[in-house]
Amino acid sequence: GSGSRIQRFPEESTKGSFTPAFICCFICVFAVLVNKVCLQVTVEGFIGGSVVLPCSSAQHDLKLQDIEVFWRHNGSKIVFDIIPHSNAPVTQDPEYKNRVESFPQEYLRGNFSIKLNNLQHTDAGQYICYISHSSEYQTVKLIINGSISPERGTEQEEMVPSLPLLLVCIILPVIVFVVVVLLIAVFWRKKHSISRAAGNSVSSATPEVVSPCAQFKPAVGK
């Protein structure tokens, strides 16, 4: 009717609907990153000694024709390729020739670790084991210390988590949890404020009832 008005509510009430999705995406991405960092293993070795660089697949009962694993050092150096179904010669950078061993009897169990012998200072750094058939990759950090002592023997296979990794795996998840709780609290508070504001708008926008008699004012003759 002539006395009615259409009240449009502010569109801000729909903007907050993306906040839960954003929070969930943030948690998922952070969880993946923390998981990858925490899975990194630190291995310590000594000049002239040997170390085992661990790498294993989550899949078991594998078939030889499906196995393709690539070991790389510092992103580019070819350490060793495990391709049991291929007769092609093993491709390696010259500095790793005759120094790398694998464990063929463990391939079908998903164990693709390698043993690096006659360690040198240049062997230090990050090693990546990329498992092609399952799109997995694992990182191993190798630290090279001074020459080995006689009582230590020739083989060192110490795998210890470094302090920065412990901090990442323990403290960061706690910080993220606190931030997520705060974001959720702010979101719900904002949503409640918007709902209350919308309710006040509805009450104030109630159309005023005007009497038909008041709308008609006869002209007064002079």
Image (cartoon, rainbow, N blue to C red):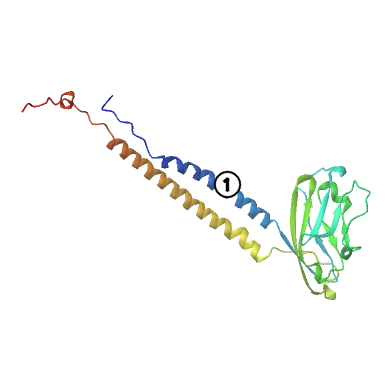
For the point 75% across and 60% down, which residue is it? Answer: 140
For the point 49% across and 45% down, which residue is it? Answer: 19
Residue 86 in view: yes
Q: Is residue 128 depicted above or below 59 in this figure?
A: below
Q: Quadrant of the N terminus?
A: top left
Q: Is residue 76 depicted above or below 108 in this figure?
A: below
Q: Disc 1 designates what residue?
A: 25
The answer to which quarter of the image holds residue 157 is: bottom right
Return the residue nearer the eye: 189 or 54: 189
Q: Residues within 10 Å of mark 1 (few under 14, many from 20)?
A: few
Residue 112 in view: no
Return the residue nearer the eye: 222 or 3: 222
Q: In the displayed structure, does residue 68 sit left or right of residue 165?
A: right
- Amino acid under label 1? Cys
Q: Quadrant of the C terminus?
A: top left
Residue 180 in the image, given as x and y percentages of width and height: 51, 51
For the point 64% across and 54% down, which residue is it? Answer: 33
For the point 82% across and 53% down, which residue is it? Answer: 70
Residue 60 in the image, given as x and y percentages of width and height: 79, 44
Residue 36 in the image, given as x and y percentages of width and height: 68, 54
Q: Which residue, as the protein is rendered here, is positioned at the far left?
A: 222
Residue 17 in the image, given as x and y percentages of width and height: 48, 41
Q: Which residue, as the protein is rendered here, is positioned at the far front?
A: 222
Q: In the displayed structure, does residue 170 sit left or right of residue 142?
A: left
The answer to which quarter of the image holds residue 168 is: bottom right
Return the residue nearer the eye: 204 or 134: 204
Q: Secondary structure at mark 1?
A: helix
